Image (cartoon, rainbow, N blue to C red):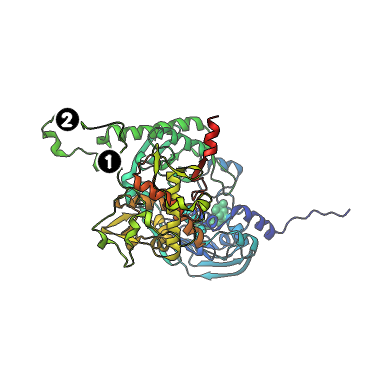
Amino acid sequence: MADIIRLLPDHVANQIAAGEVVQRPASVVKELLENAIDAGATEIKLIVKDGGKTLIQIVDNGIGMSVTDARLSFERHATSKIQKAEDLFNLSTKGFRGEALASIAAIAHVEMMTKTETDEVGTHIKIEGSKISSQEVAVVPKGTSMLVKNLFFNIPARRNFLKSDQVEYRHIADEFHRVALAHPQIAFHFYSNGSEVFMLPSTDFRKRIVHIFGRKTNEKLVPVHEDTKVVRISGFVHKPEFAKKSRGEQFFFANNRFIKSPYLHHAILGAFDGLIKPGTHPGYFLCLEVDPGTIDINIHPTKTEVKFDDEHTLYAYLKSAVKHSLGQFNVVPALDFNQDPNLNTPYGYENKQVTTPHVSVNAGFNPFQEDTPTASRGGGYTKTSAKGWENLYEGLQVNKQEFEPSTIAFESEEINSTIFDHEKNQVDAVTTTFQLRKKYIITTIKSGMVVINQSRAHQRVLYEKFLKNITIKEAVSQQLLFPLSLPFSSGELEILKEIKDNLCAVGFVFGEINSETVEVKGVPVVVVESEVQMVMDQLISDFQMEISADSFSQSDMLAKTLSKTLSVKTGEFLDQKSQIALVNDLFACKEVTLSPFNKPTYITITENDIDRKFI
Ligand code: ADP
Ligand code: MG
């Protein structure tokens, strides 16, 4: 048999390698940013278009390359960073595989301009699908500019696999955050589709965090410091009360490199144990410095997991360092120079007269009496209508009946509930209800009774209402007496801009939006003013994961989030009128049986069921 084994041509080998190195535009951004940092740049500019699919450009003022190096840099296994295998155990650079440029050049149109300090002129190289198409002398400043266009132009399957521009942009922004946080002393500029996203001056770690995540972050941070023989720990954790529902702001850096470590993450969770509500996640920005010989950076190009020699010790140190910081912050706030001013005792207090505490007793208290309605909740079920404030409501077509949910004409279509279909008379006649354990509403039907989960039922009602508002754009806004100015980070602002149209459709009214704050002038009627920030934060964190380009799923997600956040919760007392209104509203919905999250809204217990229990 003839010999059949052949060496793959370089461009094919490069394309295969590219599959590992470059998964999406964000991988290119990461590799090129790291090269710029390895080149000693003090200023780096990142420009992207269409989520990096059309263009990614990175300009640095680092050491640049000579003509020969410029050409060699695109060869596979061409690196200036290691020479022998032992060097792998003492890495101080980000790159070392010498594969990134070769891989990128195999699957995109690449242009590089570069010049060293000492060379008079620089080099301009164009390369497409691993082939150099031109090489010229160029007059350029010291440093390197890499231009990557039309990613995956020659691998349509990979190109089609990319997500929407917004999603790809978010991956790039995440990568950018990681690199920018790991190197606060380097100045970064980031532009997307022609507009400036970040302009980060050279600074310290704390200010870098604040520049990226917004002004309001500053007061959330508690410093962490621990110096031991094995590791130097520095950075910040969020104060426990700022723990979030989403796991957004959690960063570990080891020797200035972003890493993921579920094990060390667990150490942080341990330190926060008992301090944060279940289901919420602490924020942290922690830097570990260890001897480069004791850390094994994953050889896989895109993996961020690393292996530490003595992980157990590190775990213990980390947990105690974070615990210590949190303890110090809680117990002796005076020692914390970055303390929250709210924790201070006002100066006047020292001389204040001591008064005997006064306990007031309600002599008429009857423990067996039902509770009185609690403070107003969204949805209007316990809200007394805002009489006299009508003039504050925007929109001429305001229908005052909005405030009486029982009278909202929901859908003009036939009510199509399964139980009520043939019991139509009862629908109009729901007049008796009973609230069980502030959780269920019970009402009777001809064949027996229905037990309605109040929270899920209200979610369903609100969900359909918001979805309808979005689709037919007839939401009713409640104008705020004093517009609120809410702080957001630039990442959050990006998301807000994406969903702004839909937010307006459900009744939000926005004023000026600048680089750090958003002015909110009006909110949907069901939103209480004190909850606006909470509602917006929840919306952003829900959308943070994935913004869909498709407008239906965006509306759907918005309606879901709002219904979840604003619904009456288990544990809330509803007065008789609200109970009846909720039941009627639920059974006027298009889909009665399920909450927007596909959970049953009610169960029926027939007379037969009950009879059987008595046998
Ligand atoms: P690696 O970073 O693993 O060495 P790359 O393919 O990313 O491999 O880069 C190959 C080589 O090209 C680097 O080792 C470096 O010498 C050179 N290089 C790449 N980017 C730059 C840059 N921005 N400035 C200076 N030199 C660079
Ligand atoms: Mg590299």
CA distance separating discs 1 and 2: 29 Å
Q: Earlier in the sequence, mark 1 or mark 2?
A: 1
Query: SS of the residue at dot 1?
Result: loop
Query: SS of the residue at dot 2?
Result: loop
- Mark 1: give few (<14), some (14-19) or many (20+) Cα within 10 Å: some
Residue 70, percent across and down?
Answer: 56, 61
Q: Is residue 151 left or right of residue 478?
A: right
Q: Is residue 224 left or right of residue 50?
A: left
| Ligand 1 image-quadrant field | bottom right
- Three-letter code for the amino acid on which mark 1 is drawn: Gln
Residue beneath the point at 78% across and 55% down: 6
Q: Nearer the viewer, mark 1 or mark 2?
A: 2
- Three-letter code for the amino acid on which mark 2 is drawn: Pro
What label sits on residue 339 in the rendered view? Answer: 1
| Residue 308 visible in the snapshot | no
Q: Residue under circle 2?
A: 357
Q: Is mark 2 within 8 Å of ligand 2?
A: no
Residue 288, percent across and down?
Answer: 44, 39
Residue beneath the point at 36% across and 48% down: 578
Residue 310, percent across and down?
Answer: 51, 31
Of residue 164 and residue 507, the one placed in the foreground of this image is: 507
Residue beneath the point at 51% across and 42% down: 604
